[in-house]
Structures are given as structure tokens and as C-alpha cells.
Amino acid sequence: MKSKKPKKSRLGKIEYTDSPGNVFADLGISDASEAMAKAEIAKKIHNIIKKEKLTQAKAAKVLKINQPKVSLLLRGYLTDFSLERLLRFLNDLGQDVHISITPSSHRSGSTWVGDSPSNSTIAALGK
């Protein structure tokens, strides 16, 4: 799949660029696919904590980490959290995590994070 060129737009006096894919790749961040996957998983964790009305202290007990780490997680500071650890947090929050590997219809495979392939965010388009 070819990457579309970002489109520049204006919103009032603010200029912004639409991202056609992985914003981390657009910013030139190394391991952009991992960063995107971690961000999507962290967003899911955040939404579950919010839905369950857990305080950071209660979430810390469920996730078996301290409250300051919950604060970092909820604010998107993810460098201290591996993908494996974030997936384990989903399990701790009562979520089943399924990893499915299938042949790709493209030359490079893709990685998606979401409830289903049709309702997901593309984390990476090949490497």
C-alpha cells in the first residue's frame, strides 16, 4: 500500500498536516510501528479504567504497579512499558487479548490493534 502524501490545511490561524497513516512514522520516530501499537493499547487501557470508574490508586492495585506509573500510562508516557506489559494490563483489567497471524495480501504485512480487523487502527504497514 502506497503512503499518501500528508495534506497541509489551515484551521483559522493554525496550520496543520493531516496524517494518512502512522503519525509516529510521519514524525520520523524510530520503531514507529511499536510506538503506534503501544499508543493504541494504552488508549484502550485508559478507556477501560475510565469506564470502570477506577481511581489511579485502584487501577494501580489491579495492574500491580504504583500510582505514579498509572499516571504516566494514562498521560501517554509509554517508554517504561513494553508491549507485553501493556497486553498483560489488558488481561488484568478483564480483557481477553488475541494475537492472530495470517498471510498478507500485500508484499509487506501490517499490524493492527483494535477490537477486530474491521474496527482497528493500523499500527504498521510493513517494515
Image (cartoon, rainbow, N blue to C red):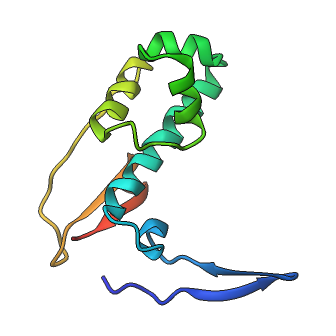
* In the image: residue 70, left or right of residue 78: right
Q: Percent from the top left, x then y, of residue 91?
A: 35, 23
The residue sitting at 71% across, 87% down in the picture is 9
Q: What count of labels does the image hold? A: 0
Q: Residue furthest left?
A: 103
The residue sitting at 32% across, 26% down in the picture is 88
Q: Percent from the top left, x then y, of residue 40?
A: 46, 48
**Nearest to the observer: residue 97 or residue 26:** 26
Image quarter in which the N terminus is found: bottom left
Q: Residue furthest right?
A: 12
The residue sitting at 46% across, 12% down in the picture is 62
Q: Report which quarter residue 112 is drawn in.
A: bottom left
* In the image: residue 48, left or right of residue 38: right
Image quarter in which the C terminus is found: bottom left
The residue sitting at 26% across, 37% down in the picture is 98
**Nearest to the observer: residue 42 or residue 71:** 71
Q: Is residue 115 above or below residue 110?
A: above
Q: Report which quarter residue 14 is drawn in.
A: bottom right
**Nearest to the observer: residue 5 or residue 26:** 26
Q: Is residue 86 above or below residue 91?
A: below
Q: Percent from the top left, x then y, of residue 81?
A: 37, 36
Q: Percent from the top left, x then y, of residue 38?
A: 40, 47
Q: Is residue 45 above or below residue 101?
A: above
